[in-house]
Image (cartoon, grey):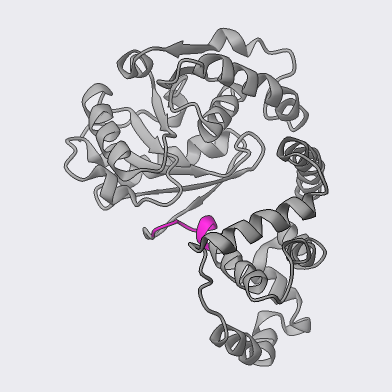
């Protein structure tokens, strides 16, 4: 088993996939001073990626995730073939569509093309690395590096590996992301959907059911979240929120008092029929109504502006 390149040896990153997630990674890697070699088969990949990075740069600079005035364009190259993109790369970040058959074929190509000491990280939002590394000759260097959108702003990255992944490879990826200003967490055991997406899926499950069965509208569900527990979640997460809700005894006092009610609520929960076209249409219509005529782009821009202010405040408070 070869020694994997350490995070200090990562100067050139091959970004495979130039969609929303892939372009966010390109911006983040460029912001950290790396050179990036992009491969995406779509003919307009280069202009789209450059536009994305240009739009993200001032935001990253304001958060000290990039240097204002840095000529990043000289460090980004776009390649017509996967082989060209991964040549001379010290690290590979894969961000292709979430389709098993596509990723399996791609991983086989990366296994063949990329030197065995170069780590290959996948942005997969759900798929276990064990499934994707099966049958590969260098399966020990394939790791999970799952970000959250917008990648250039959201700090969290879920890091882990499959059954055949070298623990040292996971440690190197973890350290690399941390050095970029990310907040990596370790997926200690593989599970479909990892950590963050399972949590949001659980919340979305009940949110959809409340709307589907007429208890609330999409707009009121979002308002209920925004103006209550979501405010605390940005500060301290779910467990600590309940810890501070238990009085001086913290979680030890909270659980005896409130666990019975929580368990009773759990017993009333069920899966909504999200595959039902009529329900989907209703959710979309209510989302349009709640948007008040604002476009998705306008909502996203307002989101990012507020998100930056929150990140600055949280970073200042956390020192």
Residue at the image point whose x is 77% and y is 48% from the top: 314
Q: Position of residue 269 (x, y in %)?
A: 56, 80
Query: Along the line of sight, which residue is nearer the eye, 148 or 121?
Result: 148
| Magenta-drawn stretch contains 197 | yes
In this rendering, does residue 165 appear at all? no
Q: Is residue 95 above or below residue 313?
A: above
Residue 130 left/right relative to 193: left
Residue 257, by quadrant, is bottom right
Q: Residue at x 36, y 58 (%)?
A: 190
Residue 282 on image: x %, y %: 65, 61
Q: Nearer the viewer, residue 65 or 82?
A: 82
**What residue occupies the far top of the structure in this picture?**
74
The image shows residue 107 at horizontal and vertical percentages of: 28, 34
Left/right placement of residue 292 relative to residue 63 reads right
Residue 110 within the segment the image draws in magenta = no
In the displayed structure, does residue 88 sit left or right of residue 67? left
């Amino acid at each position: 088993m070869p020694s994997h390149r350490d995070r200090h040896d990562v100067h050139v990153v091959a970004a495979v996939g130039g969609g929303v997630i892939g372009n966010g990674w390109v911006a983040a890697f460029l912001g950290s001073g790396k050179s990036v070699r992009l491969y995406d088969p779509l003919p307009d990949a280069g202009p789209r990626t450059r536009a994305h990075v240009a739009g993200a740069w001032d935001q990253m600079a304001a958060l000290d995730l990039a240097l204002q005035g840095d000529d990043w364009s000289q460090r980004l190259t776009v390649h017509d073939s996967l082989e060209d993109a991964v040549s001379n790369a010290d690290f590979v970040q894969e961000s292709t569509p979430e389709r098993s058959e596509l990723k399996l074929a791609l991983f086989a190509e990366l296994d063949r093309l990329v030197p065995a000491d170069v780590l290959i990280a996948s942005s997969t939002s759900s798929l276990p690395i064990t499934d994707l590394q099966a049958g590969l000759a260098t399966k020990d260097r394939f790791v999970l590096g799952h970000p959250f959108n917008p990648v250039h702003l959201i700090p969290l990255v879920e890091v882990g590996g499959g059954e055949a992944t070298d623990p040292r490879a996971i440690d190197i990826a973890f350290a690399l992301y941390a050095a970029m200003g990310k907040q990596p967490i370790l997926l200690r055991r593989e599970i479909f959907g990892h950590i963050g997406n399972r949590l949001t899926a659980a919340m979305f499950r009940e949110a959809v059911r409340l709307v589907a069965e007429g208890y609330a509208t999409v707009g009121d569900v979002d308002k209920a979240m925004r103006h209550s527990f979501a405010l605390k979640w940005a500060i301290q997460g779910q467990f600590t929120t309940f810890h501070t809700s238990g009085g001086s005894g913290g979680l030890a006092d909270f659980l005896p008092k409130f666990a019975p009610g929580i368990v009773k609520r759990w017993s009333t929960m069920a899966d909504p029929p999200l595959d039902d076209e009529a329900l989907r249409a209703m959710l979309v219509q209510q989302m349009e109504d709640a948007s008040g005529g604002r476009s998705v782009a306008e909502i996203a821009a307002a989101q990012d502006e507020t998100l930056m202010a929150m990140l600055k405040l949280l970073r200042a408070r956390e020192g």
